[in-house]
Image (cartoon, rainbow, N blue to C red):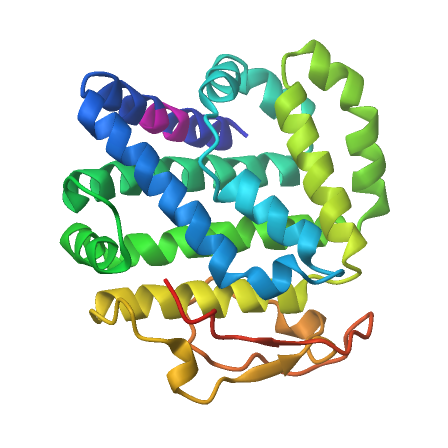
Amino acid sequence: MNAERQRISDHLARVEAERARRAGDAVLAERTQAIKHWQHARFERSYADMLASPRYAAASRFFLEDLYGPTDFTQRDRQFARIVPALVRLFPREIVKTVAALAELHALSEQFDSAMAAAVGAGVIDEAGYGRAWRRVGDPPGRERQIALMLEVGGALERYTRNPLLRHSLRLMRGPAHAAGLGALQEFLERGFDTFGAMKGANEFLALISARERELAARLFAAQDDLPTSSAAPTRVAASAIGPAAVPSTAAPAPGATPVAARAPQRDDRQFDQRAAPTT
């Protein structure tokens, strides 16, 4: 557990370093916030169908606000940094590993946001300008790692929903967690657990996130900043077509690849494009 404690601390230190960098550069700070808001709006456009889905709306909103949003988590992160030893001591090992992945995702996202802000330049951010900044920043392996970590956190929450003992343990941790200053983390975990549990199976949801985000990255690196994804016949996946065997791995599939079909725990007659809406 000492390794996980160090990993969490190191990632939170990276986040704090990015904040210190912006604190010393008002222009960079302003542009970073603009980048975050643009990305937040892009996610809303790309996942408008899922945000309107009775089954997937809550989980999509969870990703949008808790993993992808422009929310300032400064106070929460500083609390975490002070109490990492208590976190490792109080929470089950599996949850600690998920928190470590979340911390790494947070650090990587903050670093990319700062780099994008420095590369995008002054003026209104549009699709072409965002695409140029993306390619200036580069680092395809880092972008793939960012997506893989997002899926890792989502996959962990999906696994938790199949473990009643872990959910019970999480409820029992509510008092001690708040007493130790870990209330924000406790609430995040419970919110994620309940959101994913309500879906009655998150495999298609995670497969769609995987396909759309990786397709978007591939398009941006290929300088296809405003290419409508509807220009090609979309790959469709019925909501009942993805089952436990199809949870996406952290390895990058070909953009638009169809996940393996298997039995789903709950039928839903909606269909979702693996390709995003025709916008970045």
**Looking at the image, which residue is at 66% across and 66% down?**
203
| Residue 49: quadrant of the picture | bottom right
| Residue 34: quadrant of the picture | top left
* Residue 35: % across, % down: 31, 42
Prevailing secondary structure of the magenta residues: helix
Nearer the observer, 208 or 128: 128
Q: Residue furthest bottom?
A: 233
In the rendered image, the quadrant that contains the C terminus is: bottom left
* Residue 18: % across, % down: 28, 27
Report the label total: 0
Nearer the observer, 53 or 264: 53
* Residue 274: % across, % down: 52, 75
**Looking at the image, which residue is at 59% across and 34% down?**
96
| Residue 19: quadrant of the picture | top left
In the rendered image, the quadrant that contains the N terminus is: top right
Residue 112 on the magenta segment:
no
* Residue 15: % across, % down: 35, 27
Q: Is residue 256 visible?
A: yes
Q: Is residue 248 visible?
A: no
Tell me: 269 left or right of 37. right
Q: Is residue 123 above or below residue 217?
A: above
Residue 12 on the magenta segment:
yes
Q: Is residue 181 above or below residue 238?
A: above
Tell me: 219 left or right of 247. left
**Looking at the image, which residue is at 62% across and 27% down?**
185
Which residues are the magenta region? 11-15
Nearer the observer, 189 or 169: 189
